[in-house]
Image: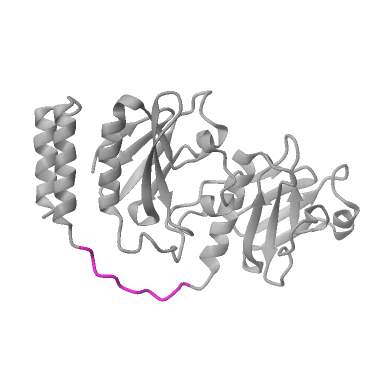
C-alpha cells in the first residue's frame, strides 16, 4: 500500500502484504511499546479491524490478531492494559474519516482464513531480554533452554531444596504468564511430563518464577514469555498444509473504497494527484 497513518505515540505503515507498526520512544509511550520498537504484522495474521470513539476527542483503530497468530498476544492472554496494546492506534477525532478509509483497506486485505485460529505463529516474537529478575529468582533464556537461578532471600524452601533449574525447549509444551500488575503474577513453564498445569502454587513450583512489586516487569517478562512460547511452538510438528484458492477482488468492495477516496478528496485530506493515483491503484485490482 505504501501509505502511513500516524497517531499518538504509534505509526502504521502499510505495505502490500503487511502493516509495520512503529512505536515512539517518548516518555508518554508505555514502556512495553518502547521495548517492542516496531512490529511487522502480515495481513494474514489479522481477523478484523475495529473502529471506535476514544476518549478526549479521539478515534481508535484496533487491528484484531487471529488466535494463535502472535506469540506476544498469546502469552499476554488478554491481560495487557489498554494503553499497552500494540495493535491499538489512537488518532485525533478530525481524522475519523481517514481512519475509516484505512480500516476498510485493511479489511479488503484479509484472507479467507481470517475468521479461523492460526495454525502457527505468523508474527515474529519480540526480541526478549536474555534474563530478568523475578522476586524469587533470575530467569534466563538462550534460545535453547530456560534457566531459573533462585535467590536465597526470596525462593521458597521447596525451590531451594530442588536447586537451580534448566529446561530445554524440547521439554516444554507451553508457557503461562500472569501479569505482575495482578495478584499472584508469575511465569510458569508447562512441561511435557504434566508439571506446570496446576493453577496456583507458583511459589512452590520449580518450573515457575514469582513476580512482585518491581520484579518481573511487564516489558521484561512478557517479551521473555513470548519468545519462549515461540521457540516451543517452532519445535512442535507442523500441521498439514491445505491450499486455499486466492480470493478474487470484490468489485463492490473496491467501489466502496473508491467512494471513501472521494470523501477524503472532498474533505481536503487527499490532493488531486493523490486521489487520481490511489483510484488508479484500486481499479487495477479488478
Judged from this view, the residue extending furthest toward the bottom is 240
Instruction: Look at the image and tell me whether residue 15 can be seen.
Output: no
Q: In front: 152, or 24?
A: 24
Residue 282: give x, y in percent of width and height.
Answer: 14, 47
Q: Which residues are magenta?
A: 238-247
Q: Measuring 31% from the left and 33% from the top, which residue is drawn there?
A: 5
Residue 21: give x, y in percent of width and height.
Answer: 39, 40
Instruction: Look at the image and tell me whether residue 107 can be seen.
Output: yes
Residue 8: give x, y in percent of width and height.
Answer: 41, 27
Q: Quadrant of the N terminus?
A: top left
Total tally of numbered discs in the picture = 0
Q: Measuring 51% from the left and 28% from the top, which residue is drawn there?
A: 29
Q: Measuring 62% from the left and 62% from the top, which residue is drawn there?
A: 174
212 to the left or right of 3? right
Magenta stretch, overall SS: loop
211 to the left or right of 27? right
Q: Quadrant of the C terminus?
A: bottom left
Q: In front: 163, or 102?
A: 102
Q: Which quadrant holds residue 168?
A: bottom right
Judge whether residue 220 is colored magenta. Answer: no
Q: Measuring 39% from the left and 37% from the top, which residue is drawn there?
A: 52
Q: In front: 119, or 167?
A: 119
Residue 63: give x, y in percent of width and height.
Answer: 39, 46
Query: Which color scheme did the rendering employ for the protein?
Result: one colour
In this rendering, the answer to whether 242 lies above or below 138 is below
Amino acid at each position: 500500500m505504501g501509505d502511513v497513518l500516524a497517531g499518538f505515540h504509534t505509526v502504521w505503515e502499510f505495505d502490500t502484504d503487511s502493516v509495520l507498526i512503529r512505536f515512539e520512544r517518548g516518555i508518554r509511550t508505555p514502556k512495553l511499546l518502547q521495548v517492542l520498537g516496531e512490529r511487522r504484522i502480515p495481513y494474514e495474521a489479522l481477523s478484523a479491524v475495529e473502529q471506535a470513539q476514544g476518549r478526549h476527542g479521539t478515534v481508535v483503530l484496533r487491528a484484531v490478531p487471529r488466535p494463535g497468530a502472535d506469540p506476544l498476544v498469546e502469552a499476554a492472554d488478554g491481560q495487557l492494559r489498554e494503553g499497552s496494546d500494540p495493535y491499538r492506534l489512537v488518532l485525533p477525532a478530525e481524522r475519523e474519516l481517514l481512519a475509516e478509509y484505512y480500516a476498510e483497506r485493511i479489511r479488503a486485505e484479509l484472507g479467507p482464513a481470517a475468521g479461523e485460529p492460526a495454525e502457527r505463529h505468523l508474527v515474529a516474537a519480540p526480541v526478549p531480554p536474555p534474563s530478568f529478575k523475578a522476586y524469587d529468582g533470575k530467569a534466563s533464556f538462550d534460545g535453547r533452554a530456560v534457566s531459573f537461578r533462585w535467590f536465597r532471600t526470596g525462593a521458597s524452601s521447596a525451590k531451594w531444596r530442588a536447586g537451580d533449574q534448566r529446561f530445554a525447549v524440547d521439554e516444554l509444551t507451553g508457557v503461562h504468564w500472569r501479569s505482575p500488575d495482578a495478584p499472584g503474577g508469575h511465569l510458569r513453564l508447562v512441561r511435557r511430563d504434566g508439571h506446570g498445569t496446576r493453577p496456583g502454587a507458583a511459589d512452590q513450583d520449580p518450573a515457575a518464577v514469582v513476580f512482585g512489586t518491581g520484579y518481573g516487569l511487564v516489558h521484561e517478562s512478557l517479551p521473555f514469555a513470548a519468545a519462549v512460547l515461540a521457540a516451543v511452538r517452532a519445535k512442535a510438528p507442523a500441521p498439514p498444509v491445505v491450499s486455499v484458492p486466492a480470493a478474487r477482488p470484490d468489485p463492490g468492495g473496491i467501489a466502496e473504497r473508491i467512494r471513501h477516496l472521494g470523501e477524503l478528496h472532498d474533505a481536503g485530506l487527499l490532493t488531486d494527484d493523490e486521489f487520481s493515483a490511489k483510484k488508479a491503484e484500486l481499479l487495477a485490482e479488478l
